[in-house]
Image (cartoon, rainbow, N blue to C red):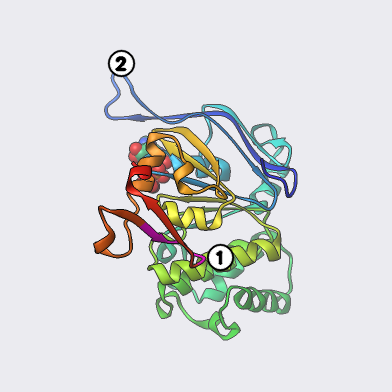
Amino acid sequence: MFSRGGSMLELRNVNKSFTVGARTLLNSNKLKVADNICLTLDQGMCLGLVGESGSGKSTLGKMVLGLEKPDEGEIWFEGKNLASMSRKERLAVRRKIQTVFQDCYSSLNPRWPIYESIREPLKNFEKLSAREEKRTIQELLISVGLSPDDMSKYPHQFSGGQLQRISIARAIALKPKLIVLDEAVSSLDVLIQHQILKLLEDLKEQYLLSYLFISHDLMAVRSISDQLAVMYKGQIVETISCKKPLSAMQHPVSKQLVASILPSHPRDRGKARITPSFDGTQELLLAANAN
Ligand SMILES: Nc1ncnc2c1ncn2[C@@H]1O[C@H](COP(=O)(O)OP(=O)(O)OP(=O)(O)O)[C@@H](O)[C@H]1O
């Protein structure tokens, strides 16, 4: 399906449940958030994971990041099963898989100049001199479209879009192979979303990155992904190439996601669904197709 490189990430029959509500001796309520998930992401590609709130997307991202463990199944990264790696190998993987979350305000320490926030992963994983660190941080800021002088400013001095650029600079500081982007553009307005998606696309080429792009926003996911996986109640109900039109999506849940995209002008709502896509082209979806 993917062709640029070999398989970077593979989820094999991954299952995960959480215990919810009161547990009694006779009863424990289990909520299945990953139900036999099988997914592959090849090197240099972007896999979009879309689905309604609570469908299990973030939990899946956390399992890839090693923040949650699957109950069953395996997660393979660069040809190795995460669960059977040595401590040293796991540490190496930790720097190769980075993340950008939605909430850039809480992911940066408000009391630190952003220099310190970007420096943190470098300090943990690289042995750089103060001079090298400073140069690296300046280069990272430039590569995300900010000024090297910004490094002495504090988070409150930046807009939401700029803060997300800083989070991205920190995520790429260790030259990772894979970035899990969990609702990374969801809190931004459409114009800034577009700019951050463009930046992510450029960085993907420049640093040969792979992305797992998690969002409930079908259009944002489609604009950056090569392949799209639709998640519903812990299951992947459909995977489809993003080269195909939205109308090619078959599963009722996918069709519902498509139907929920509102046309840009109220006049068009209810007749045809016209949605501007991020490359500026227009996609015309007849309501009959979408439903
Ligand atoms: N640690 C946990 N313990 C118990 N339940 C959890 C835990 N983490 C997540 N859940 C539940 O699992 C379900 C899936 O959550 P998850 O955050 O993975 O979904 P999501 O698709 O990312 O949703 P959203 O888009 O709202 O973030 C939700 O019902 C959530 O409340």
Q: Which residue is mark 2?
A: 25
* Residue mark closest to the camera, 2 vs 1: 1
Real-space Cα separation, disc 2 to disc 1, in angstroms: 46 Å
Q: Quadrant of ligand 1?
A: top left
Q: Which one is nearer the viewer's eye here, 278 or 288?
A: 288
Highlighted range, magenta: 274-279
Identity of the residue drawn at 30% across and 15% down = 25
Q: What's the mark number on residue 223?
A: none
Q: Position of residue 129 (x, y in %)?
A: 74, 74
Q: Is residue 94 left or right of residue 262?
A: right
Residue 206 x, y percent position in the rendering: 70, 66
Classify 207 as above or below 134. Answer: above
Front-most of 127 and 154?
Answer: 154
Q: Secondary structure at mark 1?
A: helix
- Quadrant placement of the N terminus: top right
The type of residue carrying mark 1 is Ile
Whole-percent x and y of residue 216?
40, 49
Q: Is mark 1 within 8 Å of ligand 1?
A: no
Residue 137 visible? The answer is yes
Q: Is residue 207 above or below residue 195?
A: above
Quadrant for the C terminus in the image? top left
First along the sequence among labels 2 and 1: 2
Which image quadrant is residue 150 in? bottom right
Q: Can residue 109 be spotted in the picture?
A: no
> Is residue 211 part of the magenta span, yes or no?
no
Residue 264 percent location from the top left of the image: 33, 64
Q: Residue furthest bottom?
A: 149
Q: Is residue 129 above or below residue 94?
A: below
How many labels sit on residues? 2
Q: Which residue is mark 1?
A: 168
